[in-house]
Structure formats: structure tokens, C-alpha cells
Image (tube, rainbow, N blue to C red):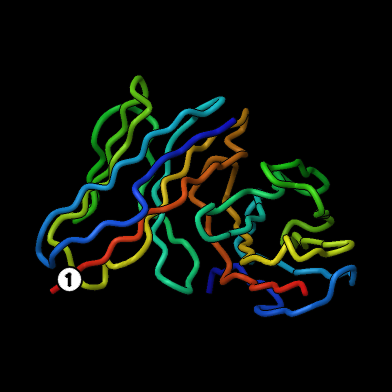
């Protein structure tokens, strides 16, 4: 089954404790992206990747890192999480930039 | 900055027609997406407009006017399962690599 998976689905952590949210797709898509979704603000793009080793900032990249060492995986790294990063995070992939995006199920992160 | 506006909430009756508007002012424009998002779920693709005009797909249609910075999503023969949020998103960037979303419109369909 074609899908985008994210782990963990739920995470509660404390300020400053490094964490990684994994994202994997099995559709051989070149393009992957991370978003956060907050009430009243909608979905905002954090980072995107056009291919292996090619990443760039979206609209809200501060406090986040990404890497794309393999085509299928695009982890999101929070080196020192803060409470304002409490949010619902979605990973997405598409065949190419500008195509229909397939979203993962989401990761609900709470930073206390 | 990027600015995409949609109404926050709308209510409509089962079987009726509803139009959800989206206006945008962005630096760069390649095309416009509409996504549907049910509560607690991931967004799913509905439509993509690049050229001006109406694109029809079953009960859903989407319209784009690039000169006016305006789009709408038209939902016909509303069903209860259409109760969801509808997200308008502008695609921009040299390779369509950036996607900016509006805040979403929560549609409630009543019997």
C-alpha cells in the first residue's frame, strides 16, 4: 500500500531534550516536506527536500533541522525543543515539486 | 509576506451547494491546490488549478482567476461526510517546491 508513515504519532517531552520525528514514504517520491499545523494559523511549511541531499527552508524553519540521506526518509530534528514548538506535524511527499502531496498521519508533539 | 484568506467557518444543508472562496497575495504563483481535511486526519488532495477557469471533478469543482488572485471550491449535492476543513494552498517557487496554505475553512453540513 502506497503510504507516508510518521513516528511517533504522539510525543510529550520537556524543553531542551533533543528529539527526532521520522518520516518514510514507499512511493519513490523525489519531493518531501514537513509542515506544522496550529489552530488559526493553518499548515505552515518548515522544510522541504527536492531529492537526496537537497533540502531548503520553508516559511518557518527556525528551531528545526532536517536531513535527506535516503530517498525514502526525511526525518525532522528538534535539537532543543521549546514550548512554542508544541504542534501537530505532518510529513508529505510528492512525485515532484508541484505535484499532489500525500500526507502522513501526523505527529502530535507537546513540549512542556 | 504571503497572504491567503479563506472564511473560517461555513454551514450548509445536506443536498445543497456551497462555495468556499480563497483570495491570495503571494510572491510567486505556480498553481493553487485545494485539500480536504477531516478532524483528526491528514489532508487529502481535491484539486489543482494552474490556468484560469473551472475544473470539474464529480461533485467538486474548483475555479481560478490568476489576475484577480482568487479561487473557489464548489461542492454540490452536499453530504454529511463533506463536513470537514477545506484548505486552499498556493504553490510557488522555481520548481513548485514551496506550498503556502490558508487557515482553512471548516464546513459543517447539517441535515
Task: Pick out the residue farthest to the left.
Answer: B15
Residue B79, by quadrant, is bottom left
Between residue B76 and residue A84, name the one nearer to us: A84
Question: What residue is drawn where x is 35% and y is 19%?
Answer: B67
Query: Element under label 1?
Result: strand
Between residue B87 and residue B49, name the one nearer to us: B87
Residue A80 visible in the shown view: yes
Residue B58 visible in the shown view: no
Question: What residue is drawn where x is 61% and y is 33%?
Answer: B95
Number of dots carrying numbers: 1
Q: Is residue B28 left or right of residue B9?
A: right
Q: Is residue B81 left or right of residue B42?
A: left
Residue B17, by quadrant, is bottom left
Between residue A66 and residue A63, name the one nearer to us: A63
Residue under label 1, please give it.
B110
- Image coords of residue A4 (percent x, y): 60, 67
Task: Pick out the residue farthest to the top.
Answer: B67
- Image coords of residue B42 (percent x, y): 50, 67
Image: A51 above or below B79: above
Placement of the C terminus of chain B among the 4 image quadrants: bottom left
Amino acid at each position: 500500500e502506497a503510504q507516508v508513515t510518521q513516528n511517533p504519532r504522539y510525543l510529550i517531552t520537556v524543553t531542551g531534550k533533543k528529539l527526532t520525528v521520522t518520516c518514510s514514504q514507499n512511493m519513490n517520491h523525489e519531493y518531501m516536506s514537513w509542515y506544522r499545523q496550529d489552530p488559526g494559523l493553518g499548515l505552515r511549511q518548515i522544510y522541504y527536500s527536492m531529492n537526496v541531499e537537497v533540502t531548503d527552508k520553508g516559511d518557518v524553519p527556525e528551531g528545526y533541522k532536517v536531513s535527506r540521506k535516503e530517498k525514502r526518509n526525511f526525518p525532522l530534528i528538534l535539537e532543543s525543543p521549546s514550548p512554542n514548538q508544541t504542534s501537530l506535524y505532518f510529513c508529505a511527499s510528492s512525485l515532484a515539486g508541484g505535484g499532489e502531496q500525500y500526507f502522513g498521519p501526523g505527529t502530535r508533539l507537546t513540549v512542556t | 509576506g504571503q497572504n491567503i484568506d479563506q472564511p473560517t467557518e461555513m454551514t450548509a444543508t445536506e443536498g445543497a451547494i456551497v462555495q468556499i472562496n480563497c483570495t491570495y497575495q503571494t510572491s510567486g504563483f505556480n498553481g493553487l491546490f485545494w485539500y480536504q481535511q477531516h478532524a483528526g486526519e491528514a489532508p487529502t488532495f481535491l484539486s489543482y488549478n494552474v490556468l484560469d477557469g473551472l475544473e470539474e471533478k464529480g461533485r467538486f469543482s474548483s475555479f481560478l482567476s490568476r489576475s484577480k488572485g482568487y479561487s473557489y471550491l464548489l461542492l454540490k449535492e452536499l453530504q454529511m461526510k463533506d463536513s470537514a476543513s477545506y484548505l486552499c494552498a498556493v504553490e510557488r517557487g522555481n520548481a513548485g517546491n514551496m506550498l503556502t496554505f490558508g487557515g482553512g475553512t471548516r464546513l459543517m453540513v447539517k441535515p
